Image: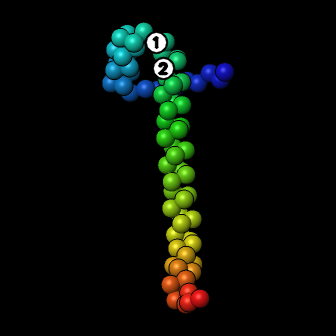
Amino acid sequence: MKTVSLKIDDSIFGETEKILAQIKKPRNRYINEAIESYNKLQRKQILEKMLKKESSLVKEDSMSVLKDFEEMDYAD
């Protein structure tokens, strides 16, 4: 494990301490779980942004192919 020193806003620290007293969880475990959760959210947002970018790159080609299929004569 790595040791990290950080500064937390007084209001966030106070709220966290109240919650920890109610759920009886160590502060370190709580912060680790919070960071893990936030990392998952950030990975999801990064992936979403990447997929939107890649989708826009192939949009014109996809529309062109769709148009070609629509213009095909499927007569037997």
- Between residues 5 and 52, which one lies in front from this camera angle? 52
Q: How far apart are marks 1 and 2 (CA)?
A: 7 Å
Q: Dot 1: few (<14), some (14–19), or many (≥20) neighbours within 10 Å? A: few
Q: In this view, does 12 lie above or below 76?
A: above
Q: Quadrant of residue 51?
A: bottom right
> In the rendered view, does 14 fall on the left or right side of 63?
left
Q: What residue type is labelled 1?
A: Lys
Query: In the displayed structure, does residue 1 sit left or right of residue 44?
Result: right
At 53% from the left and 50% from the top, the residue drawn is 46
For label 2, the SS is helix
Q: Is residue 18 above or below residue 63?
A: above
Residue at the extreme front: 76
Q: Residue at x 55, y 52 (%)?
A: 47
- Front residue of this view, candidates 71 and 9: 71
Most foreground residue, 68 or 48: 68
Residue 60, position as x, y percentages in the image:
53, 78
Residue at 66% x, 21% y is: 1
Q: How crowded is mark 2: few (under 14 residues within 10 Å), some or many (20 or more)?
A: some
Mark 1–mark 2 CB contact (< 8 Å): yes
Which residue is under mark 1?
Answer: 25
For residue 69, say whether it is visible: yes
Which image quadrant is residue 20 in? top left
Q: Which colour scheme is used?
A: rainbow
61, above or below 4, in the image? below
Precedes in sequence: disc 1 or disc 2: 1
Q: What element carries label 1?
A: loop
Q: Which amino acid does label 2 sit on?
A: Tyr
Q: Residue at x 36, y 16 (%)?
A: 19
* Nearer to the camera, 31 or 6: 31
Which residue in the protein does label 2 denote?
30
**Total marks placed:** 2
Is residue 60 in sight in this rendering? no
